[in-house]
Structure formats: structure tokens, C-alpha cells
Image: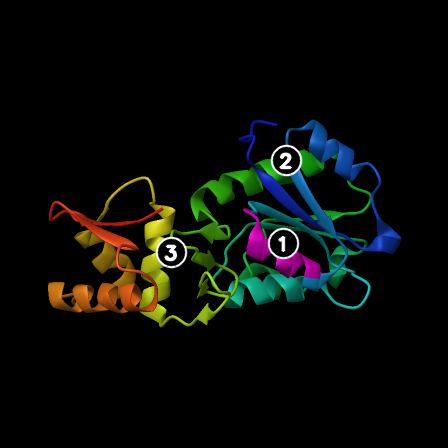
Amino acid sequence: MSTHLDTTVLYIQNESNCVIDTVPFMKRNGLKLLETTCFETACEMFSHHKIDIILIELELESKCGLEFIQCLREKNILTPAIITTNDLHKIPFMEALNLEISSCLLHPYKEEDLLHALKQAAIKAGVCHPLSYTDLNMGFSYDPLNKKIISANGETIKLCNKEIILIELLLQNKEHITSYEMIETIVWRDDFMSIDSLRTLIRGIRKKTYPNIITNHNSIGYKIDL
């Protein structure tokens, strides 16, 4: 499989309906794998690992697999998802469409069908740039699942919507300086952004965390301190 070696799949499976060959097949194709049968554990993994693709059973023990995807989408997490099922007619088409499900596979699926679905999802993952749990400096960290910063002593720091969007934009572009124009387009969207309003937003983030979390560069834009 022509995916990057850092591609990680979160596999949420039904314990009583485990497809034995799926796990070794994905590992043979160079994918890192996290496995669970539990929603709560899946959320915990999502908070602490970089996850590029979700492979999830529709018929889980106590819940529908689409419920987990719905939860992620409500948090604006667009990680590509592949649904597997024993009956394609059980998948509500419009709901799957609205949740941007990458592929649906019918048991027992062939290895080449799974490989094709994973390749398609990997392409989408490259566009989505899903964030992982990120260690910042001064003992702070960012939890992308819950959209919060955690302080060194474990305190949860709540963020307003613009603060969340700005921090995630800077993290997605962490190797480069993010321009004022890009910040205005992504964070302010259709509204006008003044330099004063941007400085006020950044000052608020610094006050909640530490002074150098976001730094200005040569009147070009800003970069997050990692």
C-alpha cells in the first residue's frame, strides 16, 4: 500500500464479529494499528494519538458505529472513516453521506476491496490533516478531541471558538509561518479582521497559557511555539 509509514488506523470492531485476517493484512501493508471494541477507549485513543483513518463496524455490541463518527463530526474532526457491515441496507444513506463516510464494505469483504478503501481514505487523510494530541511548551498540551488546552498541573483551559480555530490552524501549519491573510480567511471567514482584533485574540491565548505560545515573525504572520 502506497501510504506514508506514519499512517495510523483506529479499528473499532465488534468483538463477536471480528474479521481475523483484517489486522495482519493492514499491518502487512505498512499501517500502524490501534484496536478497540469500546467507544470510550476509542475516544481516549483519539485524544492521545495521531489517527489518520477510522475503520469501524456498523453493528457494535451496544451502539451503532455511525454514532461514533457523528460525535467526531460534531467536534469538527473530519478524519476519514470506513464502515463495515453485514448488511448494506442497514446503513442510512443520507446519514452516511452527511457524515462524509469514505467507504462502506460488506462482510465478508475481499482484501483488495479493503486495500482500495484504505487507499481512498489515505488520500482524504492527506487533505484533512487530522490533529493529534500535541505537547506544547511549559508543560501545556492541546487536546483536539475536546478542543481544550491542558495545563502542566492538569487544569483544563477552555477556549472560545476563534481561539480553537487559530490554534488548530497554527498546529496544522506548525512548520511554517501562517500569514495574516490565511488567518483572516480561516479564522474570521467572511468578516473583516483588523490587526488590533488579531492581537487581542492572541493576547487572550497567551494570558490563558504562556507568553510565547504564539510568536510574531517579521510582520508576515504568526507561528506556534513547539
Residue 59: give x, y in percent of width and height.
78, 60
Check if residue 45 falls in the magenta segment: yes
Secondary structure of residue under mark 1: helix
Q: Which quadrant would residue 52 be assigned to in this image? A: top right
Q: Position of residue 44 (x, y in %)?
A: 63, 59
Does residue 91 show up?
no
Q: Determine the CA span between mark 3 and mark 1.
A: 19 Å
Which residue matches tag 1? 45
How crowded pointer 2 is (Cα within 10 Å; few <14, some 14-19, many 20+) is rated as few
- Residue kind at label 2, given as amino acid type: His
Q: Which mark is residue 116?
A: 2
* Residue at x 46% of width, y 60% of height: 152
Say whether disc 2 or disc 1 marks the residue closer to the N-terminus. 1
What is the secondary structure assignment of the residue under circle 2?
helix
Q: Nearer the viewer, mark 2 or mark 3?
A: 3
Question: Could you tell me which residue is drawn at 32 percent across and 39 percent down?
Answer: 175
Residue 38 in the figure: left or right of residue 17: left
Q: Earlier in the sequence, mark 3 or mark 1?
A: 1
Q: Which residue position holds label 3?
A: 168
CA gap between label 2 and label 1 equals: 25 Å
| Residue pictured at 84% horizontal, 40% vertical | 20
Foreground residue among 73 and 88 = 73
Q: Which residue sits at x=26%, y=59%? A: 211
Task: Report the magenta residues as a range.
Answer: 41-50
